[in-house]
Image (spheres, rainbow, N blue to C red):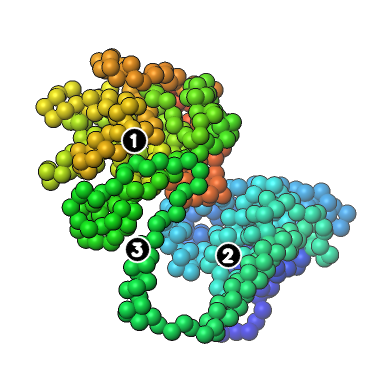
Amino acid sequence: MTDRVPAFGVPPTLRELLCGAAPYGGSAHRDLLCYLAYTWSSLIIQDQRTLCEDVGASMPMVFLIEGLWKSCMRLRDRKADAWEPDYEIFQQSLTAFWLDLGRLLYKRPAEDFEVDWHAGVSNPLDDLHGRVTLHLAMLGDPVAIDAMPDLLWMYARRAQPGEGYVELHAAAIGCELDDGSYRRQWTRGYDGLVDILSQWRERGMEPIANAAALARGQIRDAVVEAMQPRPKPMTVLAALRKEAAEAEQVPPEPEGPGLVVLASVGHLPGNVKDGEAKNSSSQTPRIEFAPIAGRRLPLVPVPDLARVQRVLAGEFPDAAGIVASILAPVAGRPYVRLPRILLRGGPGTGKSRLARRLGEELGLDVTVYGCASVSDGSVIGTSRMWGTGRASVPLQAIKRAGAASVLVVLDEISRAGTRADNGRLTDGILALAEPETARAYHDPYLECAVDLSAVSYIATANSTDGLDPALLSRFRAVDMPAPTLASLPVLARGLVAELRRERGLDARWLPDLTPEELDLVGEHWRGGSVRTLQALVECALDGRHAGPAN
């Protein structure tokens, strides 16, 4: 062991630089020269063989690092009158080095970097790339500034208290909030560097301080609540009386329009009362439907139809006219109830998605019932005498939503079975879709009349050939246009937004496709199937995290 100071000095670590430490020597070239000499001493004596071993036996990496070393040495030995042109040349060569180093590092297997990083093993080449990223950003390079949020968050996520935890998180948050912008305030003693990190830290400390104040208030409230005298425990008899009194209370009637779907379950075996929800391992029809029995269930009020039209036209630009024609009959109604619609179009044109999004934007709970290969009439419910007895599909949807107005999407109705041994699907739909029958539909599972008149139905089909004429007379057929290439940006944006909802992410973690990604998708999709487009969009998104093809 020796206490001798290295000839070129000891540089601050990249973490220390990101936390606010000054670059060694007050400039990019002095800091990099110090880091290179400290990390690879073989550069000082020009020992190319040792350097090659230290960088993973990669001669391209050796040539790249030697080039940076020479650039820094030239600038250190510059003449005073040649400072500005020499520094401009240095910055250009530093940018080229950064891009070339990034390409070489990107060719590594991703798991190699992840294992080293999570194990706390720091790779000098990764540190060098991050160090150059910071210097270029402080020199005003816009591409390097765009890379700073990822660098800051990578170190912030692994920071521990006492290791720049607050400083790193504040800088990362401030960089995101300011979208990488900064004020060009030159730092005294630095050769052309702008201290962007202090500006971002100052910006990021505001939300951190606000969150800390909020947390302190919540802790204070919790302490005050804990110090309050606790009520005496209730006796068993008092608890039974309270439970009985609550069971007798009638649930509040919903505000606005409402409808009693099921009058009573008193005719069914059991002792559960109408409107009573009871936890039981025995799920009898009476227990199952008692919560909605005798209750006036809410009807979904009509929302702002102009907003619904605007949102859906943005997601389905080629079907804006269809959306307008479907929404038109809803205007002026006291609650949402759609006309019976049959969306007809080729496979993958987005029929099912449009039907579902219509219901969601109108505030309806949506049930998608797949009709393909259904060869019986179970959609109308089955008797309790069978072990698989169940209520009709719309009544199940009402119970699940707790509302009388819901939307049932009959998907691929043209592919339903045609045998009549156990009843046909289309026959059951005819009964449910008939307004007079729906008002007092006799459900075979509950063996009583239920009011399904507020249920909306939208069917989808590739073709109406072979469909029952009686069914076609009750549904208005609307042709779904095939999406066009001109709608690619809008459709892709909608598909990415839907993926964000499914994965629970926001736009920062799953942004929209870039123009380059849209061009790549457009090379393989010229219009037609949205299903194909969705697969291409997912492929483009997955490709962001995959390494380059070998």
Q: Amino acid at mark 1?
A: Leu
Q: Which residue is mark 3?
A: 247
| Front position among marks 1 and 2 | 1
Look at 55% across and 55% down and name the residue there. 62
Identify which residue, 85 or 233, lies in the foreground: 233
CA gap, disc 3 and disc 1: 28 Å
Q: Which residue is mark 1?
A: 452
Query: Please, what secondary structure does the residue beneath circle 2 have?
Result: helix
Identify which residue, 151 or 488, lies in the foreground: 488
Can residue 280 be seen in this snapshot?
yes
Query: Please, what secondary structure does the residue beneath circle 3 have?
Result: helix
Mark 3, Cα crowd under 10 Å, few <14 / some 14-19 / many 20+, is some
- In the image: residue 188, left or right of residue 243: right
Identify which residue, 212 or 15, lies in the foreground: 212
Identify which residue, 124 or 230, lies in the foreground: 230
Quarter of the picture containing the N terminus is bottom right
Look at 27% across and 24% down and name the residue there. 430
State if disc 1 and disc 3 touch (CB < 8 Å): no
Give the percent coordinates (x, y) of residue 26: 77, 65
Q: Which residue is mark 2?
A: 156
Identify the mark nearer the N-term, 2 or 3: 2
Q: Where 430 sits versus 293, above or below?
A: above
CA gap, disc 2 and disc 3: 53 Å
Give the percent coordinates (x, y) of residue 305: 56, 32
State if disc 2 and disc 1 touch (CB < 8 Å): no
